[in-house]
Amino acid sequence: MASKTILLVEDNADDEALTFRALMKNNISNQLIVAHDGAEALDYLFCTGQYCGRDQDLGPQVVLLDLNLPKVSGLEVLRQLRADQRTKLLPVVILTSSNEEQDRLRGYENGANSYVRKPVDFNQFIESVRQLGLYWLILNELPPARR
Amino acid sequence: MSSQTAERNLLEMPQDSRSERSVIENAHRATLNILEDFALEKCELERAQRATLNILEDFASEKSQLEDFQHSFLNILDDFSQEKRQLEGTQRAVLNILEDFEGEKANVEQANVQLEREIQERKRAEEEIQRTNRDLLAANKELEAFSYSVSHDLRTPLRSIDGFSQALLEDYADKLDATAQEHLRRVRSAAQRMAALIDDMLNLSRVTRCELHRQKLDLSAMAMSIAAELQEAEPGRSVELVIESGLSGVGDPQLLRVALENLLRNSWKYTSGHAAARIEFGKSMENEKHSFFVRDDGAGFDPRYADRLFGAFQRLHTAKEFPGTGVGLATVQRIIHRHGGEIWAKAAVEKGATFYFTL
């Protein structure tokens, strides 16, 4: 289980700390990679820029993607992932503050696997992270790797 | 000519009797001749008289013809003068009509000028409306961007406030006394309440902004499904839900569900202080209008404050009595108004409330 990494795309340091805390509270000890904007997320996923030496095969088990991001927006990151053979089937969970209909619609339209709204109540957030971890890291099976 | 000769012959007769006789005979012959002459003359005279008479007769008939002709001519003249009078009458009438037309024409011209002015005014009004519409669209876009920002950006710091307060409570429980912990709990509850207010405010603005999709709706079925959800969420409560069957209305399914859910949820909430409660959904004649109603026998409210009932963030109960943000009924009212309907309420303290609405 420890080999399965999580990519968290989150620009807000508080949210990053709280997400980390929520994972700890749920004893989810998978490696957590944090990209602080859309461009960094794309660099990580496509092994470019600061991540140019990374092994593409060791992709994340799941991407937790915020929508409102500096440089490249969350939706644009999603579009580029879905347009590329290497990341077309990668599970992406949109994890955001917004519950605007438009965001939900565009998220799913662009191929998100799931859409979760971050609750304000931290206890509820811990519960959300627990269920996300249980589902995407344990229950869910990934599609076979492409060669 | 011959009468003078005969007279001289008669005066010469006594001078000679022999010659007298021949004289007489001559005279006689002469007389006879004269008489013959006279007879001829008479004949001729008679002929001439007859001719004259004939001529006169002819003249008489000519005269009567002339008279007839004159009569008919006079008649014709009479007729003509009548015609003339009639023509004059007609002419006067035509002139009057023409005069009237002049008047009418002036009226029409005036009306045309007025019409032209109205058209110009209407054009200006239309341009004004278009400009207002453009402004409105721009304002709407701005409002959408604003709502989006509120939805996303205002919630993020609230999560930090709540999350780190909780972290303090958990990680530093041994260093914080009871008062400090109570303070942190208040901070958390305030952050959560603000989050609820933001959500309700966004829902309220969404209700105003979204497009209406009208269709015929089974309101009884809608009310029943909401009632089932309420009972499922709190199975321990004893509430009799009476929903009239066969009620239908035309409206937006999503918005009317939000409205009906708010009303029924309110009834559910404000009857929570009573051991047993009854909530009704039905239709009746109120203020001479077919009105739907949601009635309960719960806490009700003081009708003196009824005018504050539908104001956003206005509450008639404290949060301790009944929790809430004061946006629910404002949302319901906006939905009903957007459908062109009306909403009003009747209530008394501890005697329940009835909300009536039309579509």
Image (cartoon, rainbow, N blue to C red):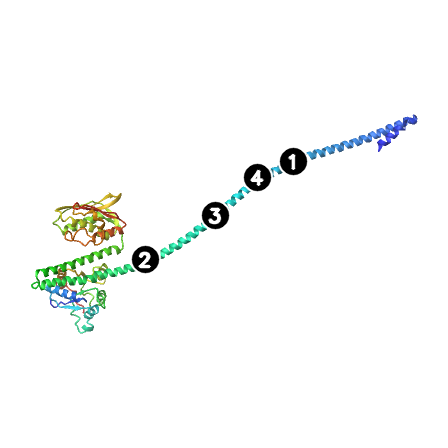
Both on one chain, marks 3 and 4?
A: yes
Residue designated by label 2? B133
In the rendered structure, find residue B82 and report the number of the disc placed on it. Answer: 4
Dot 3 and dot 1 residues touching (CB under 8 Å): no
Question: With respect to residue A10, does B129 lie above or below?
Answer: above
Q: Position of residue B339 (x, y in %)?
A: 27, 50
Q: Secondary structure at mark 2?
A: helix
Mark 3 or 1, closer to the camera: 3
Q: Earlier in the sequence, mark 4 or mark 1?
A: 1
Q: Is residue A96 visible?
A: no
Q: Position of residue B281 (x, y in %)?
A: 20, 46
Dot 2, crowdedness within 10 Å: few (<14), some or many (≥20)?
few
Q: CA distance from mark 3 to mark 4?
A: 31 Å
User: Residue shown at 13%/59% (left/top)?
Assistant: B186
The residue at the far bottom in this view is A53
Q: Amino acid at mark 1?
A: Glu
Q: Earlier in the sequence, mark 4 or mark 2?
A: 4
Q: Position of residue B295 (x, y in %)?
A: 19, 46
Q: Secondary structure at mark 3?
A: helix
User: Residue shown at 60%/39% (left/top)?
Assistant: B77
Mark 2 or 1, closer to the camera: 2
Q: CA distance from mark 4 to mark 1?
A: 22 Å
Dot 4 and dot 2 residues touching (CB under 8 Å): no
Q: CA distance from mark 3 to mark 1?
A: 52 Å
Residue designated by label 3? B103
Judged left or right of residue B215, residue A55 is: left
In the rendered structure, find residue B67 and report the number of the disc placed on it. Answer: 1
Chain ID, mark 2: B
Q: CA distance from mark 3 to mark 2?
A: 44 Å
Chain ID, mark 1: B
Q: Secondary structure at mark 1?
A: helix
Dot 1, crowdedness within 10 Å: few (<14), some or many (≥20)?
some
